[in-house]
Image (tube, grey):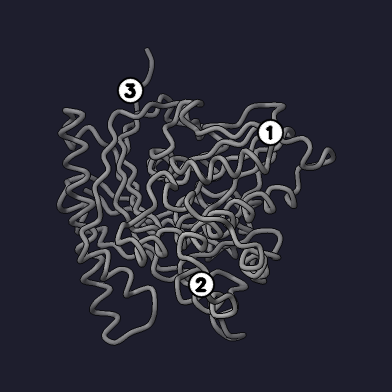
C-alpha cells in the first residue's frame, strides 16, 4: 500500500512586493527529498498597498523601525493566513489535511558573509519579516519559517534556497540544464551533466523594471514588457550598469533590494541625462538579460564549459515578460529558453512550491540547502517549526 501524500503549503512574497503566491503541493514520497508531487491548488493575492508601502519603507533605515517592522510582520501574517484560507477553500481540504506551511516572509535586510555594508567586527545576518506564531494560530497549521538563518549561521549566503528544489524537480541525469528564476532578484541554478549543482543570484530581475515603471506610468509592473518594447536600449547606460562591482563576484553570492533600488539607479542615471523613460526601461530589461547571460557563461559547467548547456528553464514573473524571454532567447541561441510550464511546474508556482518542499524537508529532518550553492559548511535542516 502506498503512503499517503504529504501535503504542504508554500507561501512566497518576493522582492517585487507585488503579492503573495501560495500553493498546496501533495508530495508523492515522504522521504529522500523527491520533488515528485503535484500542485493541488494555487492562489495569488495582490499585496495590500498600505502594507506594500510599509515594507518598502523598511528596506532602508528610518525612525521607529522596530515597532514598524513588528507591525508589518503581523500584517503580512494576516495576508498569508487569507491566502491559506483561499487555498483550503479552492482545494476543498480541511486544515487538518496540511502537514505544514513553509512561509518565507518578506526580506527587508540581507547582509550575508562578505557584504560590503558589514564592518570587520560585524556579524552577517538576514531578516525576513513575519509573525509565524500568529500565522500558525490563525490557520491551525504548523508553520516552518526563518528558513535562511541556519544557512548563514553555517557560513553560507542564506540564498538562493530554491536550487535544492530545482535539482529535485528539474534535474535530468546526463543533461546540463540552467533554471533561472526571475523575480525581483534573479537567480540561477546550474544542474550539471555530472549531477553536481551550483547556483547564485545573478543580479536584478524585475526590481528595477518594476520600480521605474511605477514611477513613470503608475503601473506596478510593465505587463509583458509592452512599455519597454517601445524604447531602445542605450549602450552607454547599459555598460555603466554592468560595471557594478557586485556583478564581477564569482562563487556563492546573493543580493537584494538593499543593493539594487531606484536610488542606486538614479545615481547611475545622473551620468546619462536626457534619456527617455521608455529607453531607460528598455535598457533595464537588457541589463537583466545580460546579467543572467554573463552569469551563465562565466559559471563552472565542468570540463565541457558553457557549451555543454542544453536548456534554460525560466520561472518567476520574468517568464511572463516577452521582452525578457525574447532577449534571453536571442542572447543564448541556439540553446532553447523555455518556461518551466513545459516541464511540469507553472512558472508562477515554482518558488512557492519550493517553500512547500522546504517545509516537507524540515518535517523529514532532511537538508534544504545546497552547500555548493550557498557556501555553507555543510547540509542543514532549515527553518524553525511553530506547531499548530
- Which mark lies nearer to you, 1 or 3? 1
User: Which residue is located at x 51 percent, y 45 percent?
Assistant: 323
Q: Residues within 10 Å of mark 3 (few under 14, many from 20)?
A: few
Q: Of callouts 2 and 1, which one flags the residue occurring earlier in the amino acid sequence?
A: 2
Residue 31: x and y in percent read: 47, 31
Q: Of callouts 1 and 3, which one flags the residue occurring earlier in the amino acid sequence?
A: 3
Left or right of 72: which side holds 330?
A: right
User: Which residue is located at x 32 percent, y 47 percent?
Assistant: 11
- Which mark lies nearer to you, 2 or 3? 2
- Which mark lies nearer to you, 2 or 1? 2
Left or right of 74: which side holds 99?
A: right
Q: For numbered disc 3, what is the local secondary structure?
A: loop
Gap between marks 1 and 3 measured at Cα = 40 Å
Residue behind mark 2:
265
Residue behind mark 3:
4
The residue most toward the top is: 1
Residue 278 - label = none
User: Which residue is located at x 20 percent, y 66 percent?
Assistant: 50
Q: For numbered disc 1, what is the local secondary structure?
A: loop
Any part of residue 364 in sight: no
Quadrant, the N terminus: top left
Any part of residue 169 in sight: yes
Seen from the viewer's position, the closer of residues 75 and 134 is 75
The reply to whether dot 2 and dot 1 touch (C-beta < 8 Å) is: no
Q: Residues within 10 Å of mark 1 (few under 14, many from 20)?
A: some
Q: In this view, does 341 lie above or below 122?
A: above
Residue behind mark 1:
335
Q: Of callouts 2 and 3, which one flags the residue occurring earlier in the amino acid sequence?
A: 3
The reply to whether dot 1 and dot 3 touch (C-beta < 8 Å) is: no
Amino acid at each position: 500500500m502506498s503512503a499517503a501524500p504529504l501535503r504542504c503549503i508554500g507561501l512566497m512574497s518576493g522582492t517585487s512586493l507585488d503579492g503573495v503566491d501560495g500553493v498546496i503541493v501533495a508530495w508523492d514520497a515522504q522521504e529522500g527529498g523527491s520533488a515528485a508531487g503535484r500542485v493541488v491548488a494555487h492562489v495569488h493575492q495582490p499585496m495590500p498597498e498600505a502594507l506594500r508601502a510599509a515594507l518598502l519603507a523598511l528596506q532602508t533605515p528610518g525612525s521607529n523601525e522596530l515597532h514598524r517592522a513588528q507591525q508589518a510582520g503581523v500584517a503580512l501574517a494576516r495576508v498569508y493566513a487569507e491566502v491559506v484560507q483561499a487555498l483550503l477553500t479552492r482545494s476543498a481540504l480541511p486544515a487538518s489535511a496540511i502537514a505544514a506551511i513553509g512561509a518565507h516572509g518578506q526580506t527587508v535586510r540581507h547582509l550575508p558573509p562578505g557584504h560590503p555594508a558589514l564592518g570587520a567586527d560585524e556579524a552577517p545576518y538576514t531578516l525576513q519579516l513575519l509573525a509565524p506564531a500568529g500565522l500558525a494560530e490563525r490557520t491551525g497549521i504548523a508553520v516552518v519559517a526563518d528558513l535562511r538563518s541556519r544557512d548563514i549561521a553555517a557560513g553560507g549566503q542564506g540564498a538562493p534556497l530554491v536550487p535544492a528544489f530545482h535539482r529535485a524537480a528539474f534535474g535530468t541525469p546526463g543533461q546540463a540544464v540552467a533554471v533561472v528564476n526571475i523575480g525581483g532578484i534573479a537567480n540561477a541554478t546550474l544542474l550539471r551533466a555530472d549531477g553536481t549543482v551550483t547556483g547564485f543570484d545573478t543580479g536584478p530581475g524585475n526590481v528595477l523594471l518594476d520600480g521605474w515603471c511605477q514611477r513613470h506610468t503608475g503601473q506596478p509592473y510593465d505587463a509583458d514588457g509592452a512599455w519597454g518594447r517601445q524604447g531602445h536600449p542605450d549602450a552607454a547606460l547599459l555598460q555603466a550598469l554592468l560595471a557594478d562591482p557586485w556583478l564581477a563576484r564569482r562563487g556563492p553570492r546573493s543580493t537584494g533590494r538593499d543593493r539594487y533600488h531606484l536610488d542606486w539607479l538614479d545615481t547611475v542615471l545622473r551620468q546619462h541625462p536626457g534619456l527617455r523613460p521608455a529607453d531607460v526601461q528598455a535598457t533595464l530589461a537588457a541589463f537583466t538579460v545580460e546579467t543572467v547571460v554573463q552569469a551563465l557563461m562565466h559559471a563552472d559547467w565542468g570540463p565541457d564549459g558553457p557549451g555543454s548547456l542544453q536548456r534554460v528553464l525560466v520561472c518567476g514573473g520574468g517568464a511572463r515578460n516577452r521582452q525578457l524571454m525574447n532577449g534571453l532567447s536571442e542572447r543564448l541561441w541556439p540553446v532553447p529558453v523555455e518556461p518551466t510550464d513545459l516541464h511540469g511546474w507553472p512558472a508562477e508556482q515554482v518558488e512557492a512550491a519550493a517553500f512547500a518542499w522546504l517545509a516537507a524537508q524540515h518535517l523529514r529532518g532532511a537538508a534544504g540547502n545546497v552547500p555548493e550553492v550557498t557556501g555553507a559548511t555543510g547540509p542543514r535542516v532549515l527553518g524553525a517549526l511553530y506547531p499548530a
